[in-house]
Amino acid sequence: MARTVGSAAEDTRRRILDATTELFHERGYASTSIRHITERLGMTKGALYYHFSSKEELLLAIVAPLLEALTTFVGALREAGTVGPEQVRELVDILDANAPLVRSLGSDPAVTRAKLEGRGITAPFMELERSISNRWQVSAGYSWQKAEITKTTASAPAGLDVPLVPKHSFSLWNRYDVSDTLGLGLGVIARSKSYASISNNVKLPGYARVDAAAYYKLMRGIEAQINVENIFGADYFPTAHSDNNIAPGGPRAVKAQLRFGF
């Protein structure tokens, strides 16, 4: 944690974080050492350690704005009680603003659960899971993808985007155990725009779908579960077979199941 206050100290911390972020982009987290960071800054290791105790603490400070923005978004979504185009655009803006960081660190094998365990954060660029309390658990997933044809073929020239691959995909799920036998779940799945086919002439619009669930323990080892998909009846188009054959998403649907544990 920081041990300094004042504008000069904050300026120094900001300079350290900016340089470290650049190095993580250039070299990857695993290949960036404290020596690389101090050389980029023209700073001694002692001066850097005065502000940050380790490379792991630097990583946490860098990703903190993204995690805070997602936490604020989720709180506003819960308060609004609905998902509309404004919320989808807001989520896409948050993810787009942090896309370079997510892209460079999300696939880095060194940024793993082991690096962040004990801090309430696990695999922050691909999956986030937290226990808000002993009864409330929140999990979220995010992916940033840029799928593109890199070599001209008989089907498509180089430079076109691969169809049905959204740039941003986000999921969030809450489970709250009301009692030892009853639990309730609420979540959202969001996707940004994608092309319907390799022609790149038609775009499928981005969408967000809200799902819910209820869990009830009938007896030891047996649990009943009811899932309600698309509870607000959103109109969306998750996939397509061509520019003229676009499949709509399912309407509100209810599913029930029994789960057995041994």
Image (tube, rainbow, N blue to C red):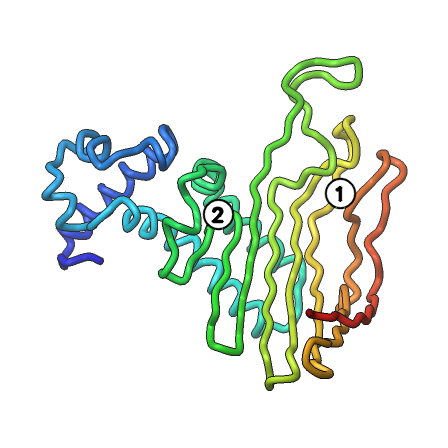
Which quadrant holds residue 118?
bottom left
Q: Residue at x 65, y 72 (%)?
A: 185
In the image: residue 55, left or right of residue 66: left
Seen at 30% across and 48% down, the residue is: 56
**86 with respect to 207 (left or right):** left
Q: Amino acid at mark 2?
A: Phe
Q: Mark 2 or 1 closer to N-term?
A: 2
Q: Which type of secondary structure does the marked residue at label 1 adopt? A: strand
Relative to 30, residue 12 above or below: below
Q: What is the total number of numbered labels drawn onto the structure image?
A: 2
**What separation in Å lies between label 2 and label 1 (alpha carbons)?**
25 Å
The answer to whether the residue labelled 2 contacts the one labelled 1, judged by CB atoms less than 8 Å apart, is no
Q: Amino acid at mark 1?
A: Leu
The residue wearing badge 2 is: 125
Tag 2, which secondary structure?
loop
Q: Which residue is identified by label 1?
A: 204
Mark 2 crowd level (few <14, some 14–19, many ≥20, 10 Å Cα) = many
